[in-house]
Amino acid sequence: MTTADPIAEIDPSAAHDLASAGALLLDVREPEEWRIGHIADAVHIPLGDLRPESLPRDRVVIAVCRSGNRSGKATAALTAAGVDVRNMAGGMKAWADAGLPVTTDDGTPGAVG
């Protein structure tokens, strides 16, 4: 029996810095959550639709959800598939609490529900 690899977690500030350096922000929330607010330039793939083979292997992926739970599941699955991935601890709630921008598809300020 082997122990599962620990999930790599980063805080919103580190996620922002990694994304600025070229990491892919992957939002795994449901469509209605995405609509009310998300991180600009994030890619939206709901957790139930996530396919590891569809993600790049040449850059870090940062998984994001509302609180960090679903993105933790995504991170575990993607890690097992060989993707270099981090879970953003605290999710969109922590991102917004850190004063980082939340937007909607039309560019207006968004919210975290």
Image: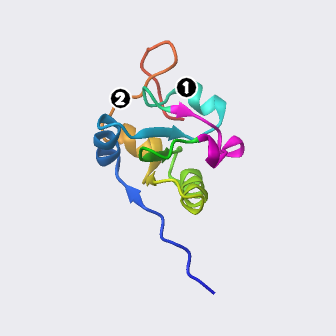
> Which amino acid does the dot numbered 2 rest on?
Pro
The residue lying toward the viewer, choosing from 49 and 109, is 49
- Is residue 39 covered in magenta? no
| 2 left or right of 16 in image | right
| 93 left or right of 33 in image | left
Quadrant of the image occupied by residue 80: bottom right
Q: Which residue is mark 2?
A: 101
Name above or below for residue 63 compared with residue 99.
Answer: below
Q: Which residue is mark 1?
A: 36
* Residue furthest to the bottom: 1
Q: Position of residue 104 (x, y in %)?
A: 49, 20
Image quadrant occupied by the N terminus = bottom right
Q: Name which residue lies at 41% across and 47% down.
A: 60
The secondary element bearing badge 2 is classed as loop
Which residues make up the magenta segment? 43-54
| 49 left or right of 62 in image | right
Q: Name which residue lies at 63% across and 46% down.
A: 53
The residue lying toward the viewer, choosing from 50 and 71, is 50
Quadrant of the image occupied by residue 28: top right
Q: Position of residue 34 (x, y in %)?
A: 57, 30
| 102 left or right of 32 in image | left
> Which amino acid does the dot numbered 1 rest on?
Ile
Q: Name which residue lies at 38% across and 37% down.
A: 96
The residue lying toward the viewer, choosing from 54 and 30, is 54
